[in-house]
Image (tube, grey):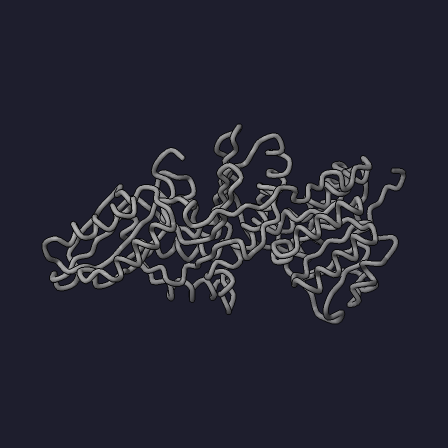
Amino acid sequence: MSRRKVNVGLMGLGTVGTGVVRIIQGHQEDLIKQTGMEIEIKRILVKDINKQRKITVDPAMVTSDPYEVIRDPEIDVIVEVIGGIETTREYILEALEQGKHVVTANKDLMALHGAEILKKAEEKGCDIFYEASVAGGIPILRALVEGFSSDRITRMMGIVNGTTNYILSKMSEEGASYEEVLKEAQELGYAEADPTADVEGHDAARKMAILSTLGFHVDMNLDDVSCKGISEVTQEDIQLGKKLGYEMKLLGIARRDDDMIEVSVEPTMVHHTHPLASIKGVFNAVYVYGEAVGETMFYGPGAGELPTATAVVSDLVTVVKNMKLGVNGRGIVAPYKEKQLKNDDQIMSKYFMRFIVRDERGVLAKITQILADQDVSLEQVLQQPYNSGKKAEIILVTHEASRKNMDTVVKQFAELDVITEIKSIYRVEGGEKL
């Protein structure tokens, strides 16, 4: 390739877009050394041309018409950081149709339409990279595509939402309630005014759909991800978990046994010996299990202007290197395996369960009989007085049991006259060799 310059169309000049401009302008010498080519932002799409911004750019570069960017014949690469789903999907598909390579940080889009976009990129011989969509500055997607290309991934487990990890960490460390810590997270800017996407697990579910699509080579839809958030987690749950050696985390879990897959996001008791138990604050971490390599962990900042922008520019550098070598689009691996999802009888896990009982003889016998009937055995049992002492609180940690059998246990416990209230039930991870 004789041309020494690559022209970029930047769609979006918000927090991440501003970071992309800062890095490209400030690191030009490094970028030229790495790629052998100058990288220049030629056009920038914004909603409001007249808005005051944190960074100065040439007004002639700025437009509010997306097609001035997408259809500009001199632009080689589109960097999309505007967010949104349906309209942005049209923009990206059009850009690929025009033969332009695409870098995006859009997790919502890739979770819902990733397979379609990958197929279009493969068809047109274009690159599509989206490292920043899952874990900010952590290069987890590149690791899955390149680092594990000769391995077979059997499991991915991670903290992929910094807001919920901040909330659960503060609840654990300071003994504060969920409501108190959420308010503090909103004041600090870690949580949105409407925190639903974070605290109900939707953000993490989108990221797990992307990870499992790449890691397992199947077209994993968002609807395939079982999702439960942290809004019902109590201080009592966290402290009793700690008493038994566990930390509460919102975990994304993707597991493949043979070719049967399960993907979920749920509050999980993680044993203190597992590395994920020690991840605090707004940091993210993803644990990957490969048949050959064994266990690996990727850790770092999951959000923020520069960490996310760094991942975007890293993808851009890869596109430029591929352009120079003439190999764009050859690394695209669209999903090629048939998706086979586990049913509730095949999803196996350990469980933490907490409930209130009448403090009288024969209670434990009735409880253990129900567990035995459903083939559920116990790893830990803790009983302590509750309130006046006329009742007792029982905390159980089971050995591995199927979700179907545990659902039956919960239903039968709810009908048992000696159990007055089922407080909580959570998945358990760690504490033994996986």
Q: Where, by quadrant of the figure, is residue 324 drawn?
A: top right
Q: Where, by quadrant of the figure, is residue 166 drawn?
A: bottom left
Q: In this view, does 294 lie to the left or right of 377?
A: right
**Rendered location of residue 294, percent (x, y):** 49, 30
Q: Where, by quadrant of the figure, is residue 320 drawn?
A: top right
**Rendered location of residue 212, percent (x, y):** 56, 46
Q: Nearer the viewer, residue 295 or 335?
A: 335
Q: Is residue 282 left or right of residue 77?
A: left
Q: Nearer the viewer, residue 152 or 164?
A: 152
The residue that appears at 86% across and 41% down in the rendered structure is 4
The residue that appears at 62% across and 33% down in the rendered structure is 149
Q: Nearer the viewer, residue 393 or 55?
A: 393
**Rendered location of residue 3, percent (x, y):** 88, 41
The residue that appears at 38% across and 50% down in the rendered structure is 403
Q: Nearer the viewer, residue 15 or 54?
A: 15
Q: In the displayed orientation, state which residue is furthest to the top.
A: 292
Q: Can residue 32 be seen in this view?
A: no
- Residue 122 vertical placement versus 183 (above, below): above
The N terminus appears in which quarter of the rendering?
top right
The C terminus appears in which quarter of the rendering?
top left
The residue that appears at 50% across and 49% down in the rendered structure is 263
**Rendered location of residue 188, percent (x, y):** 48, 62
- Residue 393 vertical placement versus 39 (above, below): below
Q: In the displayed orientation, state which residue is furthest to the left.
A: 361
